[in-house]
Amino acid sequence: MKLKFILPAVLLLLIVLLFFYPVYQQESIDINRPMADVYNQLHEPENWIKWETHLKDKGNIRQVIQKDGFSFATSSGAVQVKFLTSFIFGINDGGAIYDVVLLPQRYDRSTTVIIGFRKSLLFKIIPAFKRQLLKKTIVVELKNYLEHPSSYYGVNFKILSTTGMDMMVCQTVIDSVNRFTEIKKSAEKLLSLVPSAELENKDKIFLQITPSNKNLDMFVGVALKRQLPSNQGLTYMHIPAQKILVVSFNGLYANRRSLYTAAGRYIHDHSLRSAMPPIEIYDINGLPLSDTSRVDAQILFSAY
């Protein structure tokens, strides 16, 4: 008789423990960025609006800065951030409450983020529940933002491995005032002296301009099918096989410098090096005529 009452009581207790007894649990996720970058995104309020879902309604953000953190409120939700210690943040994201701990990994090229939360034993027993909870934290959004070049750098880089290229180039030192005239003259000289049958791509001009004291070193080149001897002021050049970042640009010629800045950050952040200055590729009929020319180009950045 006693057993009849004990078993339901035990079963009831188990149900209560499984569904209602809170247990501190942890889950981790790796972000392929240095810890300083992850920390900066979490610590600075102005960075949150770039990637946090509840803050996408930017027109109605109400922000409050406090000594130990900050908070946001919008028409689509609310977020509260507390600075618990140097590298631990307390997050209340629309009612989801958890801690975030940052741990640097080898050579500080990536960061392990530990998410700590109090949930019922059911979440600890069934991993699928915990994974579902993890997806609802800001850490997944932050990871997606930091690891995708188009969102973090504002540029969609393609990483390619080239097989090398033969080129004929016209090299000269120019001043910045006359650079557009010199680009056009060099391109015309190349196309008049190099037989079209020897061109690998008849429609493309390669351009590289680098500072040299008060002037600019410039080469304008065309891709060849094979090696040709240098002559008549033209120089044969072989660009070896290498890994490159490729980015497309369409806009005012002067604005392409923003891509140089973004590529420099990407190369630095990923501990890469450049074997040569960037090369810009234009259609023969689409060379820049001024800083305000609208151009359509590809820019190649050496990165290894």
Image (cartoon, grey):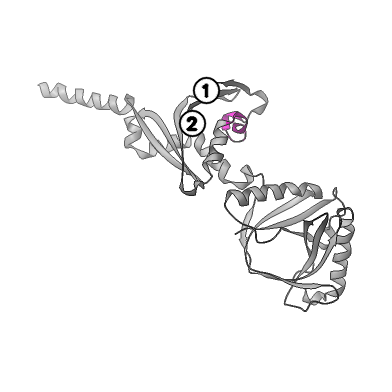
- Residue found at the far front of this picture: 213
Label 1 CA crowd tier, 10 Å (few <14, some 14–19, many 20+):
few
Q: Quadrant of the C terminus?
A: bottom right
- Mark 2–mark 1 Cα distance, whole angstroms, equals 11 Å
Q: Nearer the viewer, residue 225 or 183?
A: 183
In this rendering, the answer to whether 28 lies above or below 119 is below
Residue 7, quarter of the rendered image? top left
Identified at 63% across, 55% down, the residue is 158
Residue picked out by circle 1: 68
Left or right for 276, reference 118: right
In this rendering, the answer to whether 202 lies above or below 138 is below
Q: Dot 2: what SS?
A: loop
Q: Dot 1: what SS?
A: loop
| Residue type beneath disc 2 | Ser
Does the magenta portion include 29? no
Q: Which numbered tag is attached to residue 86?
A: 2
Tell me, yes or no, whether the two marked residues, 2 and 1, touch with CB atoms within 8 Å.
Answer: no
Tell me residue 187's x, y (percent): 85, 65
Identified at 79% across, 76% down, the residue is 230
**What is the span of residues highlighted in magenta in the rendered image?**
44-55
Question: How many numbered marks have been drawn onto this rendered protein structure?
Answer: 2
Label 2 CA crowd tier, 10 Å (few <14, some 14–19, many 20+):
few
In this rendering, the answer to whether 183 lies above or below 201 is above
Tell me residue 191's x, y (percent): 85, 70
- Residue found at the far left of this picture: 1
- Tag 1 or tag 2, which sits nearer the N-term? 1
Q: Quadrant of the N terminus?
A: top left
Q: Nearer the viewer, residue 254 or 14?
A: 254
Tell me residue 132's x, y (percent): 43, 37
Left or right for 92, reference 186: left
